[in-house]
Amino acid sequence: MEQILEIRDGCSTPAQLLKSRAFARYLAIYKKAFQEEMEARQDRQRNDALQRVAFMKTITARDALAILESERFESREVLERARAVVRFLDGAFHHYRTSGYKRLVRLQNEVVSTGDETPTTVKNKVTAKAQSLTDLILATRRLLLDRVGLDQGVRRTPGMDASPNVTAGEISGHYLNLPGDYVQLSHVPLTIAADILTGIDYSTPSNKRAEPFYELDHNPFKGEAFNADDWVSVPLQVGSSLIVAYLHKSRGTIEMEPGLLNLFPFARIDDIRAGKRPDGIFVFGDPNADPQDLGYYWDAANQVLVGMVPNRDELKYFGYCKKPILTLHNVLAIRKGEIPLHCGCTRYVVRFDEATKEPYVAEMLVKADDMGRVVLSRGEDGIVRPIFYGTETGAFACLDGFSEHAKMQMLGREVGYNKDTGSNARQIVPVADEEEVFNGDVLDVLLYMNNFTLIEQGSSTVDVDMSVEEAIEHFRLGERVAAGSTSTHRGAKESSYWANPFPLLKDNDGTVLHPDLYDKFSITEAGFIGDLKTLVARGEIKVGVAHSQLMAGVYGENSDEDLARCGYGNRDEVELKAPERLAEDLIDMIKAQAKAKCTDEADCPHEVSITVALIGDSRTGKSETAEKMEGILNFNLV
C-alpha cells in the first residue's frame, strides 16, 4: 500500500528533525514515489529521467545533515552536488505539503489514567505541536536553501503551509471496553483530540455511492487477519451512540479521517473512563474483507453492531464512511423504539417586539444537517411529544447547489473531496454546536421536502392543510428527483421509504428489506402517528409538505409552459430561485407558530423556540433552503 507518514518524534531543532526516524521514513516514501514515476515515463526524456533516478538513489538523510552543518564547501563540484541534493529535498518538501498524508501523533494517556489532563488541555497541546512542527520544517528548509546559496530574493513563507493533515492526541486502545471477541482492535490507539488541516481537497477513487449498506447474515470482522499497526481509530459520539471508526492507513482510505473529524463529535472521555462499551464498531477499508462483507451485522452475543466497508476502489468515497456510520446510529435507534429521520433540523429562536408584540427570528441554530432521531417522551400532562436530537456537527455539503457567497463562507473551515470531478464535489464544514446537537427539543414543524412539483407564484410552497395520514404517506413514499449524486440518473424520479433513513426498510415494490427492523419501526411509527394527531389537534405541531422545487427544472414531466406559468424564465433559473420562495414561506410559518405558542400576551415569554425538521434525501433542498433562510435572516456585514 502507498505509505502515509506518522510522526511520533519530538524534535525541536533542524538537526534533530533531519536525524529523526520520521524524516528518514518520508525520504524513503518520496524516493519510492519518485522512482516509480520516473521509470514509468516512455517519452524521449526517459533516459534523462533514469539518470535522475540513479542520482536520487545516492541521496541519504546524512547528506542533508552534512549540508546543514557545513559552513563552506571545499570545491565548486561539491557545492553543485549539495545544491542538487537540496533541490531534490525541496521537491520532497513540496510533495510532503501537497501530496503526502501526514499524521503527527502524541500519546495522552494521562487523560484517562490520572485525570491530570482534560480534552481541552490535550487539544491545546495538539494544536501547539502542529504549529511547532510546521515552523520547524519551514525553518529547516530555509537553512538548507541558505547553506547552498538558493535562499535568494523574496521569501513566500505564508504560502508554504507544512501542517500535518491530522495532528492527533491518542490514548491506548486498551482503555476502550471492547468485547473479548474484538480484542485485536484494542491494540489500535484511540484518537481523542485532533487538529486538522482545512482548506484542502482530497481526490478519492470514487465520488458517488452505488452499492447499498444492508444487514448481513454473518459477522464481517476477521480478527485473525487484523494487523493493528495498519489502522487508526476515532471514537465518535453519534447521537446517543458510541461508535468507534477504524480506518485503514492506505491511501484512498486514510483521507476519510479529516472528513470524519470535521463531521462528527468525539466520544465523551467520561464514557471511556467509565468503561462504557461501544454501541457500534465501524471498519473502513479492510483489505481482508470480501465483497459480500459490505454491510452491518448485529452481534447479539456481544450486544454490538458491526459495520464493514471492504478495501475496494469503488467504495473509497466519503459517502461510504458517513452513510454507514449513520446507518449504525439508525439501527440502534430503531431497536430502542426511536424514529430516525433523514432530515435537516433547525431550532429558531423567536422573540417579540416589545411595542408591537410581533415576532421576529433572532437566531437559527442547526440541530441536524442530514440525520437525527425522535424520542417519544411523555410529559407531566400525559401528552407524548416528539423530542428531536441531532447526530452531526458538520455538513457533507454538495457544492452544486450553493451560491458563490455560501462557498466563500466555507473557506478556511472546509475539508473537500473531488472538487475537480465536475458534479457532486463535496465539502465538509462545521455547522452546529455539540450542545445544540445533543440537547433535545420538541418538534414544532415536520415537513416532507418535495423537490419536483412546481408551485405557481402567489401560492404558498408549504402545504399543511392535510391530515396526518396524508402527510405520513408522503414520508412513506419518499419521492424525489435525483441530482445524479448516486447511481440514479439526474432528473429521474425515485422513491425511498421515509426518504431512506438508512438502511432502507422497504423497497419501491413494497418488499420489506429488513423484516425485524421494519416491524419494530412500524410499531413505533403507529404510536408516532397517534401522537401527531393529538398534537396537530392541539395546534402544537404542523405536519405536511414543503416544496423546494429544487430539481423541478430538470424533471422531464415539467414542461416549459409549466415553468413559465410558475414564474421561471428557464430551467436553470429554477434551482437558483425556488429555494428562496420556500425560505420566505417557512419564515412566515415559524413566526405564526411562535405566535400560537404565545396566545396569552400577559404570560408571553420574551422568546420561544420553534424547531423545524425538513425530511428528504440528497438534493431535496434541505441545505439549499437553509442557506437561503440564513441569507434572509442574517444581518451581519459580509
Image (cartoon, rainbow, N blue to C red):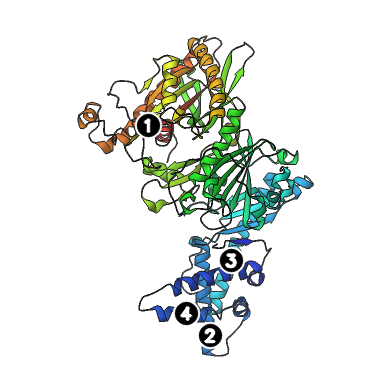
Select label 4 or label 3 by which is in front. 4
Q: Amino acid at mark 4?
A: Arg
Disc 1 and disc 2: Cα gap in Å? 67 Å
Residue position marked by numbered label 4 in the rendering: 52
The reply to whether dot 2 and dot 3 touch (C-beta < 8 Å) is: no
Q: Local crowd at mark 4 within 10 Å, few (<14), some, or many (≥20)?
A: some
- Asked whether disc 4 touches disc 2, contact meaning CB atoms under 8 Å apart, the reply is no
Q: Kindly identify the amino acid type of the residue bearing the numbered disc 2.
A: Leu
Circle nearer the N terminus (1, 2): 2
Q: Which residue is mark 2?
A: 79
Q: What kind of element bears circle 1?
A: strand
Q: Are marks 1 and 2 in contact (CB under 8 Å)?
A: no
Mark 4 / mark 2, whichever is N-terminal: 4
Q: Amino acid at mark 1?
A: Arg
> Which one is closest to the eye, mark 1 or mark 4?
1
Of tags 4 and 2, the one toward the viewer is 4
Q: Nearer the viewer, mark 1 or mark 2?
A: 1
Q: Is residue 358 visible?
A: no
Residue 360 visible in the picture: yes
**Residue at 56% in and 66% down:** 138
Return the disc, 2 or 3, that comes first in the chain's sequence. Answer: 2
Disc 4 is placed on an element classified as helix
Query: Residue under circle 1?
Result: 480
Question: How far from the left and from the top, in percent, is residue 130?
Answer: 61, 57
- What residue did someone put label 3 on? 137
Q: Position of residue 297 (x, y in %)?
A: 60, 39
- How far from the left and from the top, in percent, is residue 492? 32, 36
